[in-house]
Each structure stands twice: as structure tokens, then as C-alpha cells.
Image (spheres, rainbow, N blue to C red):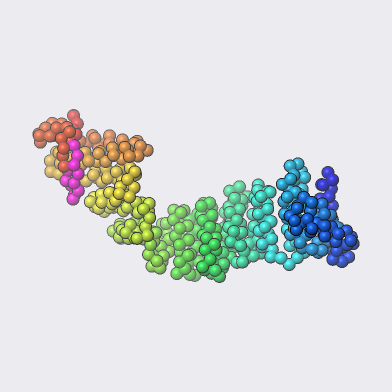
Amino acid sequence: MKNLRSIFVVVLLLFSVNMVFAQGRFGADSVDCVKNLSFYLDYNKQKDWKEAYPFWANAMNFCPPTASQNLYIHGVPIMKYMIEQTTEPTLRSARIDTLLMLFDIRMANYAVNKSEVLSHKGYEMLTYRPDDIENIQKTFLQAVMEGREKTAPHTMVLAMQKTIELYEAENLSVENVLEIYTKISEFADLQVKANPADEEVKKMRQDIETILVISGVASCDKLIAMFEPSFRATPTDKDLIVRIVQSLSANNCTDNNLYYQVVEAYHAIEPSPLSAYGLARMYLAKGDPNRAAQFYKQAIEHPDVTREDKAKYCMDLATVYLKELNNFSQAAYYARQIITLTPNDGRPYMLLGSIWAAQNCGDNEISKKAMFWVAVDYFNKAKSIDPSLTEEANKYINNYTQRFPLQQDAFMYDLTDGDVYTVHCNGLSEQTRVRTRKI
């Protein structure tokens, strides 16, 4: 209780600034003030927070806020030490209050970088009051508003992150979040322009946008309304274009004019697998699969494409050739490319099964149905590689098995179950085995 009374006295005295200040720098109790300042400073130099604490606490009691800024700077590690030594909940909470109050008193009485001080306070709140999301968010956001484009990058990111946490806790509306995002991003853009080569600053800008996009706060309409003015103002800003493409893609907002225009602008500035892929999807959505295929090929053949992305693009292109262009040989070619890239993936075998099942070839009861043998071979291969595909593969197998030639028809062509048979169709050729069904 003695410690609690001491803290309450400190609070009362600290908020009597005007009265004490009128009596000089060291206040009415100048002798006790200077004495305790001197004693705590000796221990502070040795980082002996335990011995420094009582003298520091006395200095806080006897000295007015204007006596020394160091009283509040040094008080941070001293109070953090005392907090860590305290397990009694009420006293620990009071000491945390004192710690956080040091930042407020310092800002009220000294010419300081308020953004830095608020950021420091925010970090202490994260440590000692992590569940107080509302006040943490207010503190970091205030730090951004004070620092504007000179705010530390990590502070901007935390302000956005805590804003999203408040939204997820249903304490902020979508409109509130987007308004805050607009303010933070405005300062972030200015910082990027002032420091174009600073990787930390560039990452900060990307992180702010990523936090918003991943949160799912904004609908496609809101994202478009948010990005469109910036794109109109600077249509050749590569960093902005990249952010817009990534943000719209991540939220499946790809069927709109802004996305099309931004992707084309991106590709014109710097052709890449991502820009070619974006254009392929754009032309596919516009109903031009031939043009889409051209850009898929550019994405696949680009020297910087990753193995994973190349497999994805090949899958998309094979599907376009199968479903949109009825070009079975090209569909099969790109399906096999996926197998080369990702041999443990069963999906390209499913695709090859569908390619063979979709064909229309032959001039007799055997050649017209032989492609179903090949299709079933591939569906069986798919589920053997990836058991998660078993249910889907079995549906196709059961369906196409019913289309196998009849046993008596095969007999007419001197074929029996198990015989090796080569199927030729639309430029494709596969070796399989005869399987028949009875009526």
C-alpha cells in the first residue's frame, strides 16, 4: 500500500505543473529535488535500477516536470525493471500506468519528436497491455499523424495492423478502416517518393497494402474506387501498378476495366510472367482465347518464371486449349509439361484423361471408343499419384467404362481383353490395352 500511495502522490504532483513551475526549475522542494536527482543518477549510470528506483521516485515527487527531461527518459528502464519484479496485480497495473504516463509528461513539457515518443509508448503498451487494442491502435495512429511522411516505417505498419484488428473485433467500420488506410498510405507514398532506393520504406508500403488486402475489408468496388484516382494521376508508376495488380488479383477483382488497364500498363513498362499471366486472364475473360493463349505462352516461356508458376500457367493454358479452342494436341502438350515440372501432381493426369475422353475419332466400333481406354488409364494414374483425387477420378472411370466397346464387337476385330492396342486421334497417339463390356 505504501508503494501505491507513493504512485498516487506522483500523479497528483505531476498534474500540478503550472503551480510548481512558477517556483523555479527545481520547484519549492529544490533541495530534495536536486539531492534525489543526483542520487538516482549515480545508480542509473551503473544500470542498477533496483537501487535507483527509490531515489528516482523521490525525484518524481519533489521535482516539477521541467526539472529534467532525463527524469522521464531514465524512468522508462527503471519502471520496466520494477514492473518485472512485481507480481501483485494491482501494484503491477499501477506501475504500468506510471510507465506509460512518463511518455505523456515528456511530450507535454519538452520539445520532442512526438511521433517517436508515441511509437515508443505504443511498443510498451504492446508489451504490458497487449489486449488493449483500441488504445494501442490510437497511439500508433497518433504517431503516424504526428510524424506524417517522416514516421518510422514500422510504426506505419503497426498502425495499419492494429486498425485491422479493431475492425475484426467489430470496433471499426469498413468506412473507418478505409479512411485510416487512405491517411496512412498518403504519408507512405510521400516517404517512398522521398526515399526511392530505401528497401525498408518500399517494404513498408507493400506491407500496409497487404494487410488491407488480406483482411478482406474492402469489396471490389471499394478497392477500385480507392486505387483508380492514383492510377489516373500516375499511370506509369511501376510500384503503384504492381500493388494494384496484386491487390485486385488477391481479392479476385479481375473482371473490371481498371484491372485490364493496369495489367496492360504493367506489361508495357516491364514484361514479366505476372503481367503476361494477367493479360492472358484478361483476354480470356473478354472472350478472346486465342489472344489469351499467346500471353499464357509468354508467361510460361519467360526466363524469370518460377517452377511453381510455370506449372500453374501450363495447367491454365492446357485447359484453354481443351475447353475453348478444342485443340487436343496442344492441350496434351501442356498437360505433359506440368508432369515434367511437378511429377507428384495428379491433376495433369486428370486433365489428360479429360482430353482423351473429349475427342471424336475413328471409323468403326473399336476406334470410335478406344480413346476411353486411354482416358481411364490416365484417371487411374491420377489417383495412384494423388489419393485425394480418388473420388473424382472414380466418377470419371465409372462413366467412361460404360462406353468401352462391347465384347462381341471386339471379337469381330480379332481383339480380346488385355491385348495391346495403339490409339491414334487428332495428332495424338497412346498405347493402351483392350477392355470390353458385356451387354
226 relative position to 433: left or right: right
Q: Residue at x 65, y 48 (%)?
A: 130
Q: Which residue is drawn at 54% across and 69% down?
A: 195
x then y, percent, for residue 216? 51, 51
x then y, percent, for residue 260? 40, 62
22 relative position to 53: left or right: right
Chief secondary structure of the magenta span?
A: strand
Q: Quadrant of residue 44?
A: bottom right
Q: Which residue is drawn at 69% across and 60% down?
A: 117
Confirm whether residue 333 shows in the render. yes
In the image, residue 383 lies in the stretch drawn in magenta: no
Q: In which quarter of the image is residue 71?
A: bottom right
The span shown in magenta is 423-433
Q: Is residue 166 above or below residue 412?
A: below
x then y, percent, for residue 85? 74, 45
Q: Which residue is drawn at 25% across and 49% down?
A: 332
